[in-house]
Image (cartoon, rainbow, N blue to C red):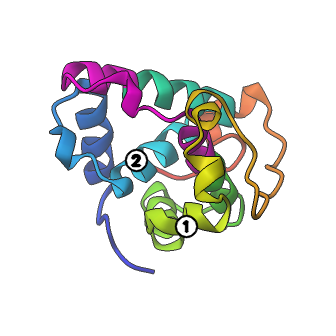
Amino acid sequence: MSNYYKSNAEIEAVVQGFESCTTPASGFTHHSHLTVAVWYLSHGTTTETVQQMRDGIFRFLDHHQVSHAKYHETLTQFWTRLVRQCLDQLNPNCSLREAVNEVIEAVGNSQVVAEYYTSEQLWSDEARKTWVEPDLKQLKQPAVEKPDDANACAGRGLKY
């Protein structure tokens, strides 16, 4: 496993920078998106995480005066679901740091999405506005999440 992060404090700083919009627009990388997704998934369900990511991205775009046209609903949901899939494969006793590092190692290349979608499907107007299922390779069904599991990584119990 690579050590993208050496501490939870580094992860928390990325989340805080995103939420407070203090991270420069150019500084919010694919790895940063994945980091925030793992953080949110460690505190809530996939559905809650998608909403938090959507709200946070719009806030971030507004702060940095970037058009909402940059937002892509299918990409937001795809990456959140793929991160959830990665987390479901990890040892349930792994730490937050280990989980984030493992997720980045597994899906840190943003081109992974091309394994699941053709360009035509992914960049369609419909996919930008609403969730569109992959047309090349399906995502695995997520583990069942219960709302009362929200504070334990939706049942995963990541250690902080």
Specify whether residue 130 is in view.
Answer: yes
Residue 127: % across, % down:
62, 37
**Residue 2 falls left or right of residue 7:** right
**Which label sits on residue 157?**
none
Q: Identify the residue at horizontal 40%, vertical 27% (top origin).
A: 69
Q: Are marks 1 and 2 in contact (CB under 8 Å)?
A: no
Amino acid beneath label 2: His
SS at circle 2: helix
**Which label sits on residue 33?**
2
Binning the other alpha carbons within 10 Å of mark 1 as few (below 14), some (14 to 19) or many (20 upward) gives few
**Residue 21 falls left or right of residue 114:** left
Amino acid beneath label 1: Val
Specify whether residue 157 is in view.
Answer: no
In depth, the one of 31 and 152 nearer the eye is 31
In depth, the one of 150 and 144 nearer the eye is 144
SS at circle 1: helix
In depth, the one of 110 and 140 nearer the eye is 110
Residue 123: % across, % down:
55, 45
The image quadrant of residue 6 is bottom left
Q: Sequence order check: which comes first, mark 1 or mark 2?
A: 2
The image quadrant of residue 58 is top left
Q: Choose mark 1 or mark 2, whichever is in front.
A: 1
Q: How many marks?
A: 2
**Residue 112 falls left or right of residue 143:** left
Our reading of the magenta stretch's main secondary structure is helix
Q: Identify the residue at horizontal 80%, vertical 31% (top origin).
A: 146
What residue span does the magenta drawing correspond to?
Answer: 58-80
- Seen in the picture, residue 85 relative to 150 is either above or below; the reply is below
Residue carrying label 1: 112
- Seen in the picture, residue 46 relative to 84 is either above or below; the reply is above
**Residue 115 falls left or right of residue 137:** left
Residue 73 in magenta stretch: yes
